[in-house]
Each structure stands twice: as structure tokens, then as C-alpha cells.
């Protein structure tokens, strides 16, 4: 009898865990309460992103979520450390971790992959 109850509890527990796992949206980054103190704010299309060395965080309920790719057009004061530089069709591009930047009026703007 005890074994039967234990099996039913395990099955019920497994079902609960499966339902819980399905409730979290697939591919969503975890939410952090705060961003590092050295983060710099930059606003793009009304959203105030926090940027720390190539990582972009957007505000969400309960804190900040790291975005997998910053929006094309967002501008920052400097490119992340460890970037590479390549000139393409007469324009200098800076890139790191599949994020590409070009200099625009003293800022660095995220752009689509140019090559």
C-alpha cells in the first residue's frame, strides 16, 4: 500500500513539474532584479536599455531581461571590449558575438551584418 501511494505521489509530482516547465516561455532569458553598477543607459524607441560591455538588458516586470540580440539602430558610446574591426565597402565595422556596429556621429550604432 505504501509503495502504491509513493508511486501515485511521484506520478502526480512529475505531472506538476511538466506543467510548470511548460508555463515558462521557450527561449526567454531569466529576469534579474538589478544590472551591474557600471551599466550605461541608452533609450531606443521609448525603451530604456541598460548596456554593459556588449550585453543589453531591457526592463520587464520585476527587473531586467538580457536580450539575445540588441535592436538594429540602438546606439552606444563605445563598442564592447574584445571587438574585432573590419572595413567593408569603405565603412569601418566593429563586431563581437554576432553584433555589428558602425560609427554614426560619434556613437556606435548596431546594424545588420554587412557582409
Image (cartoon, rainbow, N blue to C red):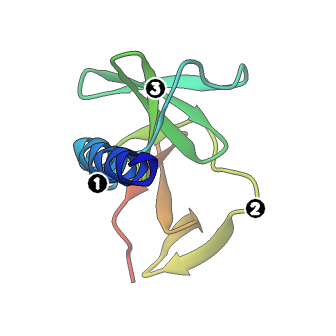
Disc 2 versus disc 3: nearer the observer: 3
Residue for point 37% across, 59% down:
111
Q: Which residue is mark 2?
A: 82
Q: Front-most of 35 and 27? A: 27
Q: Quadrant of the C terminus?
A: bottom left
Q: Front-most of 84 and 5? A: 5
Q: Are marks 1 and 3 in contact (CB under 8 Å)?
A: no
Lower sequence index among marks 1 and 3: 1
User: Can residue 52 be seen here?
Assistant: yes
The crowd level at tag 2 (other Cα within 10 Å; few <14, some 14-19, many 20+) is few
Q: Position of residue 100 (x, y in %)?
A: 48, 63
- How far separated are the C-alphas under marks 1 and 3? 17 Å
- How far separated are the C-alphas under marks 2 and 3? 24 Å
Lower sequence index among marks 2 and 3: 3
From this view, report whether residue 105 is shown above or below residue 96: above
Q: Which mark is residue 26?
A: 1
Disc 2 versus disc 1: nearer the observer: 1
Seen as rendered, the residue at the extreme front is 1
Q: Which residue is mark 3?
A: 64
Q: Secondary structure at mark 3?
A: strand
The crowd level at tag 3 (other Cα within 10 Å; few <14, some 14-19, many 20+) is many
Residue for point 38% across, 49% down:
1
From this view, report whether residue 27 is shown above or below residue 28: below
Q: Secondary structure at mark 1?
A: loop
Q: Position of residue 112 (x, y in %)?
A: 33, 65
Q: Position of residue 10 (x, y in %)?
A: 39, 50
- How far separated are the C-alphas under marks 2 and 1? 30 Å
Amino acid at each position: 500500500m505504501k509503495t502504491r501511494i509513493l508511486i501515485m505521489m511521484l506520478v502526480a509530482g512529475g505531472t506538476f513539474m511538466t506543467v510548470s516547465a511548460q508555463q515558462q516561455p521557450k527561449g526567454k532569458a531569466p529576469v534579474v532584479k538589478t544590472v551591474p553598477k557600471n551599466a550605461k543607459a541608452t533609450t531606443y524607441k521609448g525603451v530604456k536599455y541598460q548596456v554593459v560591455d556588449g550585453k543589453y538588458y531591457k526592463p520587464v516586470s520585476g527587473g531586467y531581461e538580457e536580450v539575445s540580440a540588441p535592436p538594429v539602430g540602438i546606439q552606444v558610446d563605445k563598442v564592447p571590449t574584445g571587438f574585432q574591426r573590419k572595413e567593408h565597402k569603405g565603412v569601418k565595422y566593429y563586431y563581437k558575438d554576432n553584433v555589428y556596429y558602425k560609427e554614426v556621429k560619434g556613437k556606435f550604432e548596431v546594424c545588420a551584418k554587412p557582409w
